[in-house]
């Protein structure tokens, strides 16, 4: 009987830990970190695009 009560008391903590871990996994899957090399490539492309736009005649934008 004492073992059953100990197991029951431990379940809420275990469930909380499982919930927190599931939330972390879900958030990581939804919002993956973009690798630094991709960020650098995106910045280069944006700079090139901005440079092309700055060289266009005013009426063509």
Image (cartoon, rainbow, N blue to C red):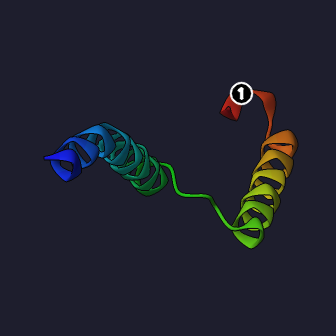
The residue beneath circle 1 is 59
Q: Residue furthest bottom?
A: 37
Q: Position of residue 6 (x, y in %)?
A: 28, 46
**Residue in front for this viewpoint, 61 or 50:** 50
Q: Quadrant of residue 59?
A: top right
Please identify the quarter of the rendering in which residue 48 is found: bottom right
Mark 1: which secondary structure?
A: helix
x and y percentages locating residue 61 in the rendered image = 68, 32
Name the residue furthest top. 59
Across and down, in percent, residue 53 comes to 78, 43
Viewer-side residue, 55 vs 50? 50
Taking 15 as reference, is 35 left or right?
Answer: right
Find the residue positioned furthest to the left.
1
Q: Residue at x 80, y 64 (%)?
A: 40
Question: Is 59 left or right of 9, judged from the image as shown?
Answer: right
> Residue 44's x, y, as percent?
82, 62
In front of the other: 37 or 24: 24
Image point 29% across, 38% down: which residue?
A: 9
Q: Left or right of 47: which side holds 16?
A: left
**Residue located at (81% from left, 45% from top):** 50
Relative height, residue 33 to residue 15 (above, below): below
Number of numbered discs overlaid on the protein picture: 1
13 or 61: which is nearer to us?
A: 13
- Mark 1 residue crowding within 10 angstroms, few (<14) / some (14–19) / many (20+): few
């Amino acid at each position: 009987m004492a073992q059953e009560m100990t197991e029951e008391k431990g379940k809420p903590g275990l469930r909380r830990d499982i919930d927190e871990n599931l939330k972390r996994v879900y958030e990581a899957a939804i919002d993956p970190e973009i690798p630094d090399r991709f960020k650098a490539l995106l910045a280069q492309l944006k700079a090139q695009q901005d440079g092309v736009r700055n060289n266009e005649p005013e009426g063509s934008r």
